[in-house]
Amino acid sequence: MSENEKFDVIVVGGGPAGLTAGYVAAKAGLQVVILERGDFCGAKNVFGGIFFTNVLKQIMPDKISEMPVERVVTKRRWSLLTPDGEIAGGFKFTKYSEEPYNNSYTVIRAKFDKWLSEKTEEAGAMILTGATVDDFIIEDNKIKGVKVRMEEGNIYGDIIILADGVNSLLAKKLGLHKELPKEATIVGVKEVIALPEEKIKDRFQLNENDGVAYEYFGYAAKGAIGSGFIYTNKDTISIGVGATIKSLLEHKYNPNDLLEYFKNHPAIFPYIRDGEQKEYSAHLIPDMGYDGISKLYKDNVMVVGDAAGFVNASLFHEGTNLAMESGRIAGETAIEAKRKNDWSSVTISLYEKRLNESFVIKDLKKFRKLPKTLEHNPQLFKKYPEIMEEFVRDMFTADGEPKNNKQRRLIGRLLKKESIFGFIKTAFAARRVIL
Amino acid sequence: MSTRIFKTMEDKLGLDKFKPFEKTHLKIKQGINAKELVEGKLFVCPAKVYELNEKGEAIVSFENCLECGTCRVAAPDEIEWEYPQGGFGVTFRFS
């Protein structure tokens, strides 16, 4: 392809961030090409997960009813897993079973992202699949396009939106970020397990289209810094566990062995009993938070979604919506750049300005201490769950001992294991990063 | 307890759809002690792509790669990692 046939926008990566950027720009009449390395958009994409559709609704309100979703997440639950049991709490709201369904759905990404890519094509974007991008075309010290490892070869464009996911080799190549840090990169492994629909509804006490998001903290990753999850789809369950790479290296754990441990934990196993495994997947999660996000733009380049590090790893576990919002803003910035015919950072810096005003950056800022708090408080993952279990279990043990005696005795015993100062310090640190 | 649904890694990977390319996209750099690398770092690979044979040499089963990038982050100085050829590698269908 020659420079005479150049696009306005080249998007690298057909996930939620890239497709949204492409959709918004194409809808406004820009010439857009999206390069996806999989056989179709969604082929390589993995998440927990919940797909939050607030941004989708904003950009294509008339398409929302066609979304290929599995279940509406009406019930969320957080559990502190201990080696033998769990202490849990959560909510279930009937309001979430009604319009607008809290914009929270479980989805199968192979179906959902593919659907989103079809809508993006209908909006006028061109999507090339099987296209791995290895490098940039740089001429006269300017980024003019990308090099694709296929017959198409060089593709020229005015702006390149890097939506190539957590392993963004391209953003790294431009020096926009360094290598992912081991202590703040989570490897998540997941299995999809099939069960009859009726069984899923019974086990999780669900009405017709309702679904759950169960998250497991504490000892979910056998003492490593990590957590586990269960999400219900129509007739499958997504179950997985994640831990920081650093922590896995220190504990000498393989993530799959952690998943097997988690699946067979007495508090977990009853949910998946007699299920049939359908798929096993693995994916990295950028958990660096606000202080680890990449530089977001330079002349002719913007970075969106996981490639930029947009994941809210607090209790809220949001990612897809941050990806789409960053994609939307990048798309709008491209429209502005086209109007001004200026693709330099003078105009492109609008992307960062607008992002700073959005929930993406505001939420990441709110939870900016999360990665360090987890890293520096390993007691949250083993010692404390054990202490909590001992306390609650003993308090509820029916043995005729008066409750006041029990309490005094237990507090005395606990304070031998951890100082009151240690408890308070950890509690404050944890609270600040959770809500 | 009732029956567990354990599967070996081999059986688990057998569930996934792979279209391996003819050439590897994962390489251990020249001059690296493979045994130390696999035992010290690459054991974290979720698909156990890196294993040692009886002679202590690394076997890299790139055709089983889930393309997550864990090995790249665990051993950035010892591994050459690139995405597989477009259209090849793993295709997720139910995730």
Image (cartoon, grey):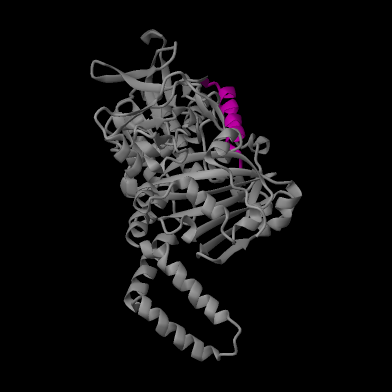
Position of residue A198 measured from the top left corner of the image (x, y, whole percent): 76, 50
Say whether residue B77 is magenta. Answer: no
For the question of whether residue A17 can be seen, the reply is yes
Position of residue A90 measured from the top left corner of the image (x, y, whole percent): 58, 63
The residue at 43%/46% (across/down) is A254
Say whether residue A122 is magenta. Answer: yes
Left or right of A431, for residue A292: left
Left or right of A383, for residue A220: right
Along the line of sight, which residue is nearer the eye, B65 or A282? B65
Position of residue A390 measured from the top left corner of the image (x, y, whole percent): 49, 75
Along the line of sight, which residue is nearer the eye, A223 or A53? A223
Q: Which residue ends up furthest to the front in the rendered image?
A: B54
Up/down of A240 relative to A427, above or below: above
For the C terminus of chain A, the image quarter is bottom left
Along the line of sight, which residue is nearer the eye, A162 or A259? A259
Position of residue A415 measured from the top left corner of the image (x, y, whole percent): 37, 80
Chief secondary structure of the magenta portion: helix
Tally of numbered discs: 0
For the N terminus of chain A, the image quarter is top left
For the question of whether residue A318 can be seen, the reply is no
The residue at 54%/44% (across/down) is A190
The residue at 39%/42% (across/down) is B43
Q: Which residues are magenta?
A: A107-127
Up/down of A182 relative to B77, above or below: below
Left or right of A78, for residue B57: left
